[in-house]
Image: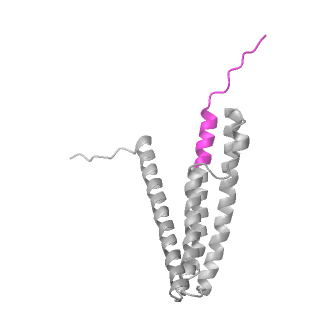
Amino acid sequence: MTIDVEAPLSPATGARIVRVAVSAARTLLGVALLVMVALNVVNAVCRYVLGIVFTGADEVLVFMMIWLVMLGLILVTADRRNIALDFLASRLAPRPRQMLAVVQHAAMTAACAFATIQCWAFVSRVAAIGQTSMALGLPMAIPHFALVVGLGGTTVVAALLLANDIAELLHAQPNKRTDRA
């Protein structure tokens, strides 16, 4: 009797999975944005044309916006498009540019990890006291948890980018210099 053991994912397969996941996340965020626009239009029509108050629409829009921004933060970080010092990095040679990326991702990892811990403590307190929103009575831990997810996800992505940057820096071929004796 033989047991087939699956081979680990190849880097190409792993990269493809990441691309599909990022594409799906972007699509979901786009759909969420369209839902927000539609909800805003319905709210405006109800309020200004029909004279009806659409209770909770503003709350839902704000809560969705918080989630949208925090999930988008993870995607922007994965694309290396936030806190980008492009004006400086574009003027640097490859090796100093790699070192700047290491510093940048180390700072982001540390700052986001600290912020995640603080947000988690705050969400825990909000959940413990049972605070709810004014219009819909939703637990306020739900919109606040978006910060934990966004900053925690950004911490993980920044740490992975940091590890990648360090590996690239260590494996980069140093500039060959000609020594004259």
Is residue 157 at all visible to an observer of this figure?
no
Image quarter hosting the C terminus: top right
From this view, report whether residue 36 is shown above or below residue 152: below
Quarter holding residue 120: bottom right
Residue 134, horizontal then vertical, whole percent: 60, 88
As drawn, the residue found furthest toward the right would be 181
From this view, report whether residue 97 is shown above or below residue 80: above
As drawn, the residue found furthest toward the left would be 1
Residue 44, horizontal then vertical, whole percent: 54, 79
Residue closest to the eye, 70 or 49:
49
Q: For residue 88: magenta? A: no
- The boundaries of the magenta stretch are 161-181
Q: How is the image coloured?
A: one colour
Residue closest to the eye, 147 or 11:
147
Residue under the point 60% across and 48% down = 80
Residue 78, horizontal then vertical, whole percent: 56, 51
Is residue 13 at all visible to an observer of this figure?
yes
Residue under the point 57% across and 80% down = 58
Residue under the point 51% across and 70% down = 37
Q: For residue 163: magenta? A: yes
Quarter holding residue 170: top right
Left of 137 or right of it: where is 111?
right
From this view, report whether residue 125 is shown above or below residue 82: below
From this view, report whether residue 39 is shown above or below residue 117: below
